[in-house]
Amino acid sequence: MTAVAENGQAATQHMVRAEQIVKRFGSLTILNGIDLSVKHGQVVVIIGPSGSGKTTLLRCINHLEKIDSGRIYVNGELVGYRLVKGRMVESSEADIARMRAKIGFVFQRFNLFPHLTVLENIIEAPVHVLGQSKTEAKEYATTLLGKVGLAEKAHVYPHKLSGGQQQRVAIARALAMKPKLMLFDEATSALDPELVGEVLKVMRQLAEEGMTMIVVTHEMGFAREVADHVIFMDKAIIVEQGPPEQIFSQAQNERTRDFLGMIHEE
Amino acid sequence: MSLRQSASLIIFLMGGCMILSLLLTAYTNVSSTDKGSAPNATQPSVTAPQDLLTPGTLTVGSDTTYPPQEFIDTATGQATGFDIDLITAIAQRMGLKTTIVPAGFDTIIDSLNAKRFDVVISAVAISNERKQKADFVPYFNAGASLLVQKGNPRHITSTSDLCGLNVGVQKGTVEQDYLTTADKACKEKHKSAINLTILQNQTDVVQLLATGRVVATYQDSPVTDYYLQQNAGRFDVGGSVVNAVAEGMAIRKGDTSMFNAVQTALNQLKADGTYRKLFKKWGIMSGELPLNRPQGVTGVFRWDIFWQFLFSPFFLRAAWTTLWISVVAQFLGVVLGLFLALMRMSRSPMLNWPARAYIWFFRGSPLLVQVLVLFDGLPRIPQAFGLDPRLWQAFVLGPITVVLIAFSLNEGAYMAEIIRAGITSVDAGQMEAAKSLGMRYALAMRRIILPQAARVIVPPLGNEFNNMLKTTSIASVIGLLELTNTAQIFGSPTFTTFELLLVATLYYLLLTTVWSYVQAWIEKRLDPNRTNKLDLQKKGWTQRVLGFGAADTRGAGTLVSGH
């Protein structure tokens, strides 16, 4: 996989580095000085109660949300802004789009394009953004569909698929852009319980292949097994972070322990 | 075929229709307004005036709904009448061909000054007011007289007898002014006011009398005589001819070469007896009527006229005009509406506010007014601002151009709101998903958002187009020969406007019915579920065409199941 190859080349450089991110909606502070770093090939899982700001943090990383202050770098490049005489100025639409094309994003509600078939969903951006030929894009899309176990669904419209199948198509659609980084925003929260497993399986496989991933999730089992690093967020700040065994077995902070306790009681 | 491909196909088909329509425009224009005159043996004896609109042709404006002076011959579709023969004879003296341009009477002098034609002959009575706007060559002496029911049951002998009564008159005539004066006199004497019905066509005015809606009509005396003779035993003249004034051919002020040429030619025609012969031919004040068909007001439905016109080239051409104007205006309206909708949804006030103002204006003012402003108002701008006279002609738009511009601009405002609603109906996650894949706004709009919005847009768009097909009738006010105007113009000489309006109605129904099938097909293609394919087949024609039966809820569903 591409991700593995690059991993070797630039192991010292961080894939994602965020410094003192502040994000407000009106008077409400959603992110209050977040620092984050993700190494190449690392799987970082962000957990925390709803409203803690974890989804917003993820959306800031590919500039679906603007930030009020701070800096985010992906692969060494400043995200969404450029510096003009020391001031942050929002990048051009084209630059933002170019940057996003390298970052895969998987939504809680899948957001497949309902007017396109599964295959058309996957090749849409490779053809119209990357300028690949249809043949080339279809070939790779078929490989990806095989990988997520949906090879036979290529010519079906999304509404004919189960939620789990739709989410696997959404992952394939993001992977078709050959991203260097994948962001998962509660990818299994909208699914019926029996469908969660099939999506997690695909995500786990991706992690094993060395993809750099930031995963916002409530699936603690997944976090424990797959994550290299776990971040616990609450009330707009990072409360505690560390390797999964440390967070799940010997959390230092009371809020972390309370949260994990509540999750286990469920 | 995928949904996307069908959307492209629809756009392609609409574009194709438009191009085809534009190609055929020239043909429609020429054939609907030209009155080609056969070359005459008469040698030119008068120097032709300079600066003709079309070299070699005298372009004449006339309201051809005023028999016997000017009307449409229902057999040939060409303008005819005393005035038409006279101006044709005058043009022949100048060695020119004649083109008759149909025009509305109340704006005919304005149109002359806007250089829509070289000269006007349309039974225009010379008044001081009109003399300020144009020069006149008098050719006909006419007064005003009253037409009343047979036996004059109300004993009407002058306009002073009309207080408190229902009276009909044609719009923009001197008789309308006389009646207004008479109405004031009634009030001064503390009598009831005259209850006026003012219509565009003289024939419709006389129809009012025939059906008893009014007790008298007031018009030029030759016209009174004509209708009296056409409808023997139905009407009488009330009182005598008053206010005898000359009718004149109107010529733009300062156009002396035209004025002299017309005056000289008319003098020659009077001298050699041609003028007198025309008087006889048209039976004006002579009792002779040359028209070869029994005509007149009758209570009987004229099936012969109905069948004669149902498949006539006049109506086929009018239906085509109605159709292609609708298609082009709707297409341009959709394109304009798309840009307005995107501007309106923009967060930038620079884009947002102009779009709001535009939609506010065009949805807030009547289309009829917009058409008249473009047709009559625009040509006044260069004069008002003292622009170079050579530029004036650029401000005089032809009827088809005016209609296409006004209808497109108006439709754009409505489509903007429909398209905006369609775009808003698409889940916000769709744009985010597109952006997260590196798509830019324009690409995401074109490939992701609009194809989905189309499903919500098409049903109201279908309504708009259905409306557009019928709204084209507004174009009749500026003389365009679409279905409604064709019915009125061809119906007025024979009092068969009703029969011909029925013909026009059948054509409208045909067009809207065909469209309802096209719309159903488009909606079916845009449906991602396609589960309604069966429903559509099961649904009876009554529901699709007449709109009754089970409610169609396809527009209301969510776009993605499983949400």
Image (cartoon, coloured by chain):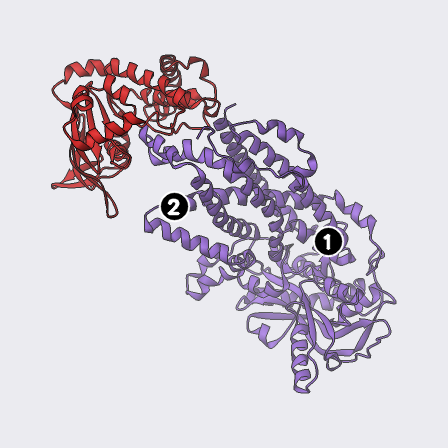
| Residue A3 in picture, x, y percent from top left | 23, 16
| Residue B438 in picture, x, y percent from top left | 31, 29
Q: Is residue B309 above or below residue B127?
A: above
Tell me the element at label 1: helix
Q: Quick one: label 2 or label 1, which is nearer the N terminus?
A: 2
Q: Residue B539 vs residue B554: left or right?
A: right
| Label ID, residue B68 | none
Give the alpha-carbon distance from disc 2 to disc 1, as whole Å.
48 Å
Q: Is residue A157 above or below residue B471?
A: above
| Label ID, residue B490 | 1
Q: Quadrant of the N terminus of chain A?
A: top left
Q: Could you tell me which residue is drawn at 45 percent across and 64 percent down?
A: B383
Which of the chains is red?
A: A
Rendering colour (chain B)? purple
| Label ID, residue B345 | 2
Amino acid under disc 2: Met
| Residue B44 in picture, x, y percent from top left | 66, 58
Crowd tier of the residue under label 1, counting other residues whose Cα lies within 10 Å: few below 14, some 14–19, many 20 or above = many
Q: Nearer the viewer, residue B282 or A5?
A: A5
Residue B196's quadrant in the figure?
A: bottom right
Tell me the element at label 2: helix
Amino acid under disc 1: Phe
